[in-house]
Image (tube, helix red, strand yellow):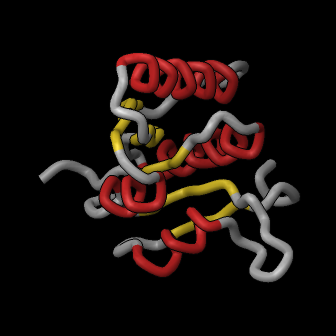
Amino acid sequence: MGKRPVVVGVDGTVAGVRALAWAMDQALERDVPLHVVNAWQQNTVPARERSRELVDDALVTAATGRLRHPQIIRRCLPGPAAEVLVEAARSATLLVLAAHDRPTTGLGRVSAHCVLHASVPVVVLHEETAD
C-alpha cells in the first residue's frame, strides 16, 4: 500500500490558494503525495475544463518561488464539494480546507460538513492562519 496522501480542496479563492500552499508544506514534511481536489456540479465539458483550469491556476500560484514540490495529483471530480472532499479524503492522512467563515460558526457549509463527516483529521485554515 502506498503512502496516504494529503488532500486539499481548492475553489478558486485566495484563501484556497493559501490552503494549497500550506498543504504542499505538509505533504513535503510527511513525504507523501498531495491530491489537489476541485468539485464541479454541472455535467458539461465547460464545467470540467473550468475545474481543471482552476486547479492548474491555483497550483501555479502556490508553487511560485518554491524550491521543492511534493508529488501532485490533480483531481477534478463531479458532485457537491462537501461530499466529493469527504470521499476524496477517505484514504488520506489529512484533509486541508480554507475557511469561508460564517459569523455564527466560523466555518462555511463545505468545511463544516467535512469536519463532521470526514474519516481523517481535517485542518480548516482561517484567513489569519492560512499564511
Inspect this view and state whether residue 29 appears: yes
Return the residue nearer the eye: 14 or 84. 84
Question: Residue sitting at 87 percent across and 58 percent down?
Answer: 128
Rendering coords of residue 67 (x, y %): 62, 22
Q: Check the image and report above or below for 114 versus 26.
A: below
Please indicate whether residue 49 sits to the left or right of residue 55 in the image.
left
Say which of 26 and 92 sits in front. Answer: 92
Image coordinates for residue 68, horizontal then vertical, percent: 56, 26
* Residue 78: quadrant of the picture: top left
Q: Nearer the viewer, residue 131 or 48?
A: 48
Q: Residue at point 72% right, 38% down?
A: 13
Image quadrant of residue 15?
top right
Left or right: residue 47 versus residue 109 is: left
Residue 51, x across and y down, in percent: 48, 27
Residue at the location (33% across, 59% down)? 92
Q: Is residue 92 above or below residue 114?
A: above
Which residue sits at x=40%, y=41%? 35
Give the image quarter of residue 25.
Answer: top right
Relative vertical location of residue 1 with respect to residue 70 in this rendering, above or below: below
Badge count? 0
From where the camera sits, is residue 37 visible? no
